[in-house]
Amino acid sequence: MSTTAPEPRKSPASGAGGVGSEDGLWGLVLWSGSAWFSDWFYRRLQWSVSVKHKRLDVLQPHLTDGSWETLLLAIRAHLEKGLPLQAELEVRLPGGGSENWQVSGVVEHNIGGQPVYLACRMCLVKPRGL
C-alpha cells in the first residue's frame, strides 16, 4: 500500500455538489493537509485569482468567533464517529458584512479503510422569510 497522498481532485464526491453548482466546492487531502477551493470562494471572499489557496486554514480569518471551531469539530465528528458532516458557519465578508454558510461533506476511504480525502461544499443559507 502506498503512503503517498493522492493529488487533490477538482471534482466533488457523490453528494458534495455537482458541476455548475451555485455552491462552493472544496476538498481536503487528509494525509497531506492540502486543499483546493472552487471559484465560488474566490468570488465571495474576493480572493485574488493569482493566488491559489491550498490550505484549509485560509478560511479561518473569514469565520466569526466560534465558527472555525465549529467547522473543525464537525470534520472531527465526521471522521471519528461517522456523524454527517453538516454545520452552519457565520462568515465575515470583505467590506464588513457577513452571511451564513452551510457546510456539508463526505469522507472517502482507501482500500484499507483509512480516511484519505474530504469532499465538501458550502452553500449560502438564505435568510428566513425569503
Image: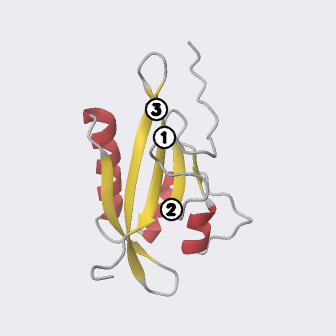
Q: Quadrant of residue 125?
A: bottom left
Q: Quadrant of residue 49?
A: bottom right
Could you say where residue 5 lies in the image, as x and y percent from the top left? 58, 29
Distance between mark 3 and mark 1 Cα atoms: 10 Å
User: Pointers 3 and 1 in contact (CB under 8 A)?
Assistant: no
Instruction: Give the residue type at disc 1.
Output: Ser
Residue located beneath label 2 in the image: 23
Left or right of 30, for residue 125: left
Mark 3 in CB contact with mark 2 (< 8 angstroms): no
Name the residue at the top extreme.
Answer: 1
Whether residue 45 is visible to the viewer of this picture, yes or no, is no
Disc 2 marks a residue whose amino acid type is: Asp
Is 49 displayed left or right of 93 in the figure?
Answer: right
The answer to which of marks 3 and 2 sits earlier in the sequence is 2
> Where residue 47 sits: x, y (%)?
62, 70
The mark nearer the N terminus, 3 or 1, is 1
**Alpha carbon of mark 1 to alpha carbon of mark 2: how far?**
14 Å
Question: Quick one: label 2, few (<14), some, or many (20+) residues within 10 Å?
Answer: many
Q: Can the viewer see residue 12?
A: yes
Quarter occupied by the N terminus: top right
Asked if marks 1 and 2 touch (Cβ < 8 Å), the reply is no
- Name the residue tied to disc 1: 14
Residue beneath label 3, please?
108
